[in-house]
């Protein structure tokens, strides 16, 4: 609507004055029927809540967990949840594997408790991955949990257990569906088009079914939307998105759902974000605040290099808790959320490596969560020693030190006209820094804070600013060389 108005306005000014119209801020003036629904960030309470999460958990769980990346004595080195696409894996063998899916050890409450202890404030759960297997008893296909000997509705158990722990639930849904007869990668023939219509109806039905069965759902995390066939469904996807949003007020949908009428995904032809947050930060992170263009975003991250579903042999580098904590802090310092992936095994157990990392992150969060929850970009230049975050509702800054400085002091450039009013260790509020421990550079704009000890884990110092430059800090003495 806003777009249409803008278009008319620009059109009128051209007609009236025959001059070049002033450029609309950062946008070209192409009228899009299926472009973004909104310019700028959402300002409602639900989106505010999303923005404040800081840390989330992703769970990839499905039939693929039974293979653990193995078939017939061979190891599939790719992402375990993709094993069905491996040439060595017979399709019908995979498509019959679900009969053996009976995760006797699955305990949604234990998962939720662990996620809570780790500090996750939201969870994204795979209701259906590319294989098409439904972790809920969908009435639109037989390829579901109801057809296994396990029978029980896994999505329901996850939604209830996590909701009871106060963790918001988001449903992952793959549009790619290797099991549905109408699914196509591209539409080459009239037959393809006809078949794909049945697939579109099926997809819409399943999504509405999910939101009806699990009204606690806070959002949908879409995937597998890059195929040409889907990209051509701009109008269909646009109205489906509106219908889904109408079912749950405040529902959150990222930028990986639909394309505009020119086939542009994530950002429409005018360069505007489609959906509520940018959903392209997958196993990568922005470097600067400019990289995120003022949009909300989250980063989804694997513990090994590229395994989402359970793979019994993690190859390559496995991230440490310190590395993961650093990625989380970096995300928050650039106004995003960090979501860590878990891939439970075929029995329903979370592997020991993941449990250990969850514990270690949780221990850090117990002390330092204030730097993550309700926190965001602080407006400072990125320091070499780590990251700075800021509480969204207070003038409190969190200096998160990762690289122990050789000098034993961290430097900090304050915004003009600001002085330090309070400075203390987050793990010990009474541990304030004295003026003697805060040294000023000769120019006066830079401070050197002498750390009380070499931090063993990423350490957080809280900074509160006052409006005048104050008297904080004594002159910093440079080494004479
Ligand atoms: C997709 C899936 O194929 C994968 O199995 C997993 O579920 C992951 C979360 O999402 O993989 C992608 C999707 C998008 C990109 C990379 C991998 N991307 O945009 O770079």
Image: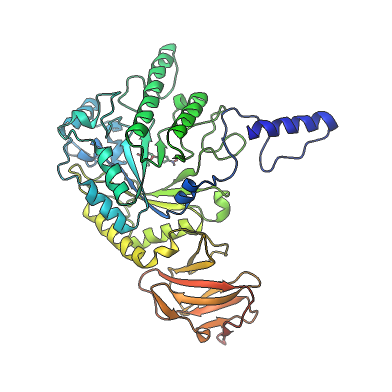
User: Relative to residue 181, is residue 352 depicted above or below?
Assistant: below
Q: In the visual, does 142 lie left or right of 457?
A: left
Left/right placement of residue 285 relative to residue 211 reads right
Q: Residue furthest top?
A: 190
Q: Residue at x 62, y 80 (%)?
A: 470
Instruction: Residue 70: give x, y in percent of width and height.
Output: 21, 40
Taking the image in four quarters, ligand 1 sits in the one at top left
- Quarter of the view holding residue 326: bottom left
- Identify the image's colour scheme: rainbow, by chain, secondary structure or one colour: rainbow
User: Horizontal placement of 170 versus 94: left or right?
Assistant: right
Q: Nearer the viewer, residue 4 or 454?
A: 4
Residue at the spot 54% in from the left edge and 32% down from the top edge: 264
Nearest the eye: 87 or 43: 43
- Residue 184, image x and y in percent? 39, 22
Q: Nearer the viewer, residue 53 or 329?
A: 53
- Image quadrant where one finds the C terminus: bottom right
- The x and y percentages for residue 221 are 40, 39
Tell me the quarter of the picture where residue 124 sits. Answer: top left
The mark tally for this picture is 0
Quarter of the rendering occupied by the N terminus? top right
Q: Does residue 476 appear in this view?
A: no
Q: Is residue 377 left or right of residue 180?
A: right
Q: Which residue is at the front of the view, 258 or 366?
A: 366
């Amino acid at each position: 609507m806003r777009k249409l108005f803008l278009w008319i306005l620009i059109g009128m000014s051209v007609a009236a004055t025959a001059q070049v119209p002033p450029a609309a801020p950062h946008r070209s003036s192409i009228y899009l029927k299926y472009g973004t629904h909104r310019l700028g960030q959402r300002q409602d309470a639900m989106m505010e809540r999303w923005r404040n999460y800081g840390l989330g958990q992703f769970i990839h769980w499905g039939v693929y967990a039974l293979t653990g990346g193995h078939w017939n004595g061979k190891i599939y080195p790719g992402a375990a949840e993709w094993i069905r696409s491996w040439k060595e894996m017979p399709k019908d063998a995979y498509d019959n594997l679900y009969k053996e899916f009976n995760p006797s050890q699955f305990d949604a409450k234990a998962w939720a408790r662990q996620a809570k202890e780790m500090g996750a404030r939201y969870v994204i759960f795979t209701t259906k991955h590319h294989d098409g297997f439904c972790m809920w008893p969908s009435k639109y296909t037989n390829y579901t949990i109801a057809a296994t000997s396990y029978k029980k509705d896994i999505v329901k158990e996850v939604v209830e257990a996590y909701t009871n722990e106060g963790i918001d639930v988001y449903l992952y849904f793959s549009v790619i569906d290797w099991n549905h007869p109408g699914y196509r990668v591209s539409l080459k023939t009239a037959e393809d088009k006809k078949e794909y219509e049945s697939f579109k109806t099926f997809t819409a039905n399943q999504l509405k079914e999910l939101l009806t069965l699990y009204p606690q759902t806070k959002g949908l995390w879409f995937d597998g939307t890059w195929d040409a066939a889907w990209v051509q469904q701009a109008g269909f996807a646009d109205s489906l998105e509106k219908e889904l949003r109408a079912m749950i007020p405040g529902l959150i949908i990222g930028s990986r759902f639909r394309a505009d009428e020119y086939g542009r995904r994530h950002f429409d032809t005018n360069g505007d974000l489609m959906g509520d947050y940018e959903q392209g930060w997958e196993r990568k992170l922005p470097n600067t605040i400019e990289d995120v263009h003022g949009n909300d975003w989250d980063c989804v991250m694997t513990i090994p290099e590229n395994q989402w579903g359970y793979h019994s042999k993690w190859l390559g580098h496995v991230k440490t808790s310190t590395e993961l904590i650093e990625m989380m802090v970096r995300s928050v310092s650039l106004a995003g959320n960090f979501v860590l992936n878990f891939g439970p095994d075929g029995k329903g157990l979370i592997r020991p490596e993941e449990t250990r990392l969850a514990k270690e992150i949780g221990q850090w969060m117990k002390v330092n969560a204030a730097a993550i929850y309700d926190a965001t970009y602080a407006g400072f230049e990125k320091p070499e020693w780590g990251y700075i975050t800021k509480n969204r509702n207070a003038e409190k800054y969190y200096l998160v030190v990762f690289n122990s400085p050789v000098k034993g002091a961290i430097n900090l450039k304050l915004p003009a006209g600001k002085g330090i009013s309070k400075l203390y260790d987050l793990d010990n509020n009474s541990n304030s820094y004295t003026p003697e421990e805060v040294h000023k550079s000769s120019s006066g704009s830079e401070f050197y804070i002498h750390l009380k000890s070499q931090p063993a884990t990423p350490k957080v110092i809280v900074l509160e600013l006052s409006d005048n430059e104050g008297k904080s800090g004594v002159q910093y003495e440079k080494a004479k060389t």
